[in-house]
């Protein structure tokens, strides 16, 4: 079974081909970072225009890289939610037109559920049930993945997403976007214990996250109490900028790990899967593996499947397609993760 997956939920135009549910034949991502760089965030109108310009070429390349043609496809999977509405609409309109013109079935995919299963491409033995931590620029949440049609959200962030926090701290540290990789790179030359940044603890051992307090703590540490984003770094900073980056990264990673291990224990599962752009973080990978109790396997996707991509959409689409899921050709999009 060969499925084409399309994702245009945010600022990456992505398409991938997956065979038999988990064999990734191609994975093409056209990043728009350079278009949004000047704005310190994604500009929805610019994003949807760029998707419209690129989607056809990206899908053609995904087919060419896999050495396949449209005739070989069994289904088309597309992200319909959550995301920027104008961006989602471009991918969905393209997928609908392609499905109609080729007489192919269309499968609607929930973007976060796809992040929650992306690791399957690299872990053949991964099976339900498991717990998934999805941490990206737009979402940070824990899911109980009890079966293909029972993916239940256990908890999420009260405010910023983890990746968003990395991005905002990168602005404070004068580092390029996306912030995750640049903060992480600087952190390798700093000490993670130099600054005791706060770690959010959900009341009563809950499964929620919060990152806005950590972001403010970094701001005040760098610019002084009550400091503002555009203020200069204070002259009497007691440590290096690299120390700030490393201590922030350790605090953010700690804040992701504790609720994830708690969720895995509460659900009584043997696998903890991580997905989303932040899953590429080396400290998260190292410390989660180190802190996981015996009997809990921690599964990360390969870096190319952590961030937004079409292959994970194809994987999730293939799983749902096999269960009989079909989307009508007038399928709509939604900005929301849940109604
Ligand atoms: O999944 P993704 O590509 O897009 C969203 O759906 O948001 O995630 C992008 C986010 C960005 O906020 C980026 O800074 C973060 O993932 N990220 C990282 C790393 N690589 C990407 N955060 C921490 N460490 C990294 N190595
Ligand atoms: Zn994503």
Image: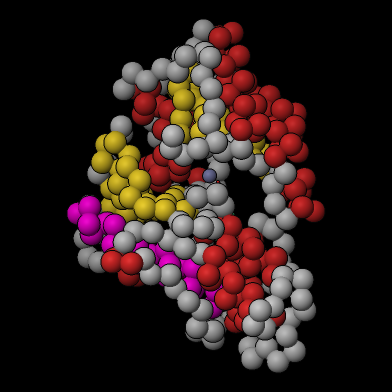
In percent of width and height, residue 40 lies at 73, 55
With respect to residue 57, does 197 lie above or below?
A: below
Instruction: Give the residue at x 43% y 37%.
Output: 338
Question: Is residue 266 a member of the stretch shown in magenta?
Answer: yes
Give the image quarter of residue 228: bottom right
Q: Residue at x 29, y 66 (%)?
A: 205
Image quadrant holding the N terminus, namely top left
Verify whether residue 42 appears in magenta: no
Q: Is residue 305 left or right of residue 60?
A: left
The magenta-colored residue range is 247-268
Could you tell me residue 126's position as x and y percent? 30, 44
* Residue at the right extreme of this rendering: 38
- Is residue 145 toward the left or the right of residue 37 in the image? left
- Which quarter of the image is occupied by the C terminus? top left
Q: Nearer the viewer, residue 293 or 68?
A: 293
Asked if one can make out residue 185 in the rendered structure from this viewpoint, the answer is: no
Is residue 299 rendered to the left or right of residue 330?
A: left
Q: Is residue 107 visible?
A: yes
Q: Which of 187 and 334 lies nearest the eye of the viewer?
A: 334
Magenta portion: prevailing SS class: helix
| Of the pair 254 and 228, the residue shown nearer to us | 228
> Residue at point 51% right, 58% down?
159
Residue at the spot x=75%, y=48% of the render? 36
In the image, residue 295 lies at what x, y percent? 21, 60
Residue 62, image x and y in percent? 60, 29
Q: Is residue 304 above or below residue 286?
A: above
């Amino acid at each position: 079974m060969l499925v084409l997956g399309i994702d245009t939920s945010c600022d990456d135009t992505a398409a991938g081909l997956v065979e038999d549910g988990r064999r990734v034949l191609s994975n093409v991502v056209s990043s728009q970072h350079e278009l949004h760089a000047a704005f310190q965030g994604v500009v929805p109108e610019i994003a949807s225009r760029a998707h419209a310009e690129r989607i056809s070429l990206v899908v053609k390349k995904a087919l060419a890289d896999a050495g396949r043609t449209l005739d070989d496809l069994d289904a088309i999977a597309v992200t319909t939610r959550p995301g920027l509405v104008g961006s989602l609409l471009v991918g969905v309109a393209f997928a609908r037109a392609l499905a109609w013109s080729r007489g192919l079935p269309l499968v609607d995919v929930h973007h976060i559920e796809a992040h929650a299963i992306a690791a399957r491409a690299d872990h053949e033995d991964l099976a339900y049930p498991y717990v998934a931590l999805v941490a990206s620029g737009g979402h940070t949440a824990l899911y109980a993945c009890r079966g293909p049609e029972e993916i239940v959200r256990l908890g999420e962030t009260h405010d910023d997403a983890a990746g968003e926090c990395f991005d905002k701290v990168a602005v404070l540290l004068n580092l390029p976007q996306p912030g995750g990789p640049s903060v992480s790179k600087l952190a390798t030359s700093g000490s993670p214990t130099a600054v005791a940044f706060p770690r959010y603890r959900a009341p009563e051992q809950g499964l929620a996250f919060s990152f806005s307090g950590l972001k403010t703590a970094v701001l005040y540490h760098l610019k002084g109490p009550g400091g503002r984003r555009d203020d200069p770094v204070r002259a009497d900073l007691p440590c290096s900028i690299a120390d700030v980056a490393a201590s922030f990264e350790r605090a953010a990673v700690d804040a992701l790990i504790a609720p994830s291990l708690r969720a895995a224990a509460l659900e009584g599962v043997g696998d903890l899967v991580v997905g989303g752009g932040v899953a590429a973080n080396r400290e998260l990978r190292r410390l989660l593996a180190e802190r996981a109790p015996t009997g809990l396997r921690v599964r990360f996707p390969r870096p190319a499947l952590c961030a937004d991509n079409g292959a994970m959409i194809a994987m999730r689409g293939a799983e749902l397609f096999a269960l009989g899921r079909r989307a009508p050709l007038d399928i709509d999009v939604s900005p929301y993760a849940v109604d």
